[in-house]
Image (cartoon, grey):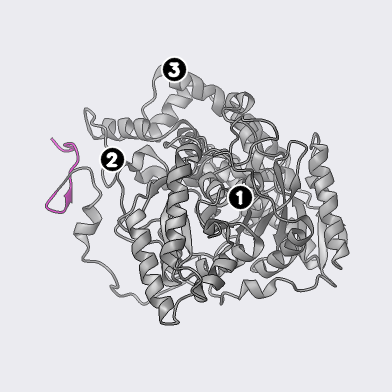
Amino acid sequence: MTDLTKLTIAEARTKLKAREFSAVELTDAYLGAIDAANGRINAYVAVTHDRARDMAKASDARLAKGQGGALEGIPLGIKDLFGTEGVHTQAASHILDGFKPRYESTVTANLWADGAVMLGKLNMDEFAMGSSNETSYYGPVINPWRAKGSNKDLVPGGSSGGSAAAVAAWLCAGATATDTGGSIRQPAALTGTVGIKPTYGRVSRWGIVAFASSLDQAGPLARDVRDAAILLKSMASVDTKDTTSVDRPVPDYEAALGRSLKGVKIGIPREYRMDGMPDEIEALWKKGIEWLRDAGAEIVDISLPHTKYALPAYYIVAPAEASSNLARYDGVRYGLRVPGKDIIDMYEQTRAAGFGREVKRRIMIGTYVLSAGYYDAYYVRAQQVRTLIKRDFETVYRDGIDAILTPATPSAAFGLADEEMNADPVKMYLNDIFTVTVNMAGLPGIAVPAGLDAKGLPLGLQLIGKPFDEEMLFRTAHVIEQAAGRFEPARWW
Amino acid sequence: MSVDLATVKRVARLARIAVTPEDAERMTGELNTILGFVEQLSEVDVTGVEPMTSVIPMEMKKRRDAVTDGDKAADIVANAPATEENFFLVPKVVE
């Protein structure tokens, strides 16, 4: 029998319906692949063998009756940030030791209602804070990609590094992920997978561990554009439990694939041409422009003047919101407790032991910028800059631009324990330079693989859309995918 | 703007994170690197610009003022490190 784990969701869906194999067989193929590979890749922090088989059996029963949802029998990996009832949910942090929620997040509930099967919980940067998946309490995830002729381990990006690595290494058919500053799109680019961060409000945040509430948005990581469209359709919903959930029907994203780009205007922002940008990224961007032009799109040079201020403004807004969201981890209601001489000491010892270095750093920055005397100079100013960033996008969209093409990341995957990035936190933050503007403006953005660099590592392009026009992103990303082809790592694990 | 060791210790106290003298020393350097990076925002002219409050314009959702959930004390304390009869247990706070 062919390797079932190599099938896309669209292919598996058809074959499951035709009963070419059962959902249990498909799930067992993935569980076997995880058990064989996870020791090397470290993508999963918990594997739910029994639950996966039970869910697959239920899917088979429905499929046998000719029933079944849009994802019936499709095995998925779930980022450890999503609340899953009775199952490991720790945001890859020590402070949530042993936490098993008594509720199910809206996103995962939507997936199970559509028939999907849960394989387990995926590794990530602690509380989604990081761009290399090295801040996890459960250790780093290893990228399934290696440079040609090298056996050096590379990072998969972050914070959704476990999601991206699991999808690329055929350890799940697709995965859930979240994106606060680039945490879906950067790991997608570094692993040759497709990742979309939808418009703020498109996907419910209910039941997802909060990092920065005004920026967080969940989305899928998938092997190709069609699979990403299928997954987003199931993940997205209108949810009364999230007051920022937007009351708009969810379109059939898959139907957007294959539509012509005739008459579509693609903006190329000059501010994304950064000093010191590698030639390969520049060349890839040019290729992307040619592919879209060949498909009938009109290419327009545009300006987004406040681009360079997005990352510094983000490093005020996101830590400020994080310091407030993470105040709840106090050793009283869940997770870790370290005893102290009084209650304050107990809080302080618990948080000192429970949070990792990067999380503490961001809580400290957030606490500082919100503290008396600094609030206006830092926080209010950053939110004003955010208004200007959003206005930049509104202006070009008003002038008729339909989507914007940029590189997804400033480089391909890098090595573990990078010395420069360890010595200077800002160097690590620069990974999100092309993606963070999108979160600041609440817009949708997709990363799609577009080629390999000279070392044979994947590189991605990003498309940014108008609010709630995810369809345009799937349509344009599909054109790039058709032109560039798909990329797979050589199996070494 | 930059922070000194005393400020870092004060912020750590506000954030309820115990720091050793070595932690505080290291954090002072790291925080100053980050604050140095965000300093460039001071060159942006923000005169008359409204601070962002919501990225997507929307009206605050309202629901009927009625009890729709509750009676879940056992669920709520289920994950707590120390409980007794559906209460959270904490070190003594009142003498």
Residue marked by disc 2: A331
What secondary structure do most residues of the magenta stretch adopt? loop
Q: Position of residue A118 (x, y in %)?
A: 41, 59
Name which residue type carries label 3: Glu
The residues tagged by marks 1 and 2 sit, at their Cα atoms, a distance apart of: 32 Å
Residue A205, can we see it? no
Residue lying at 83% horizontally and 38% vertically, measured from the top left:
A279
| A349 w.r.t. A270: above or below | above
A229 vs B28, nearest the viewer: A229
Tag 3 and tag 2, C-beta contact below 8 Å = no
The residues tagged by marks 3 and 1 sit, at their Cα atoms, a distance apart of: 34 Å
A8 vs B37, nearest the viewer: A8
Name which residue type carries label 1: Gln
Tag 3 and tag 1, C-beta contact below 8 Å = no
Chain letter of disc 2?
A
Q: Position of residue A327 (x, y in %)?
A: 38, 43
Chain letter of disc 1?
A
| A98 w.r.t. B54: above or below | above
Chain letter of disc 3?
B
Residue marked by disc 1: A383
Residue lying at 24% horizontally and 29% vertically, measured from the top left:
A340
Q: Earlier in the sequence, mark 1 or mark 2?
A: 2
Q: Position of residue A151 (x, y in %)?
A: 62, 30
Range of the magenta residues?
Answer: B84-95
Query: How many C-alpha atoms fall within 10 Å of the one at disc 1: few (<14), some, or many (≥20)?
Result: many
Name which residue type carries label 2: Gly
Q: In what quadrant of the picture does the C terminus of chain A appear?
A: top right
Residue marked by disc 3: B22
Q: Are labels 1 and 2 on one chain?
A: yes
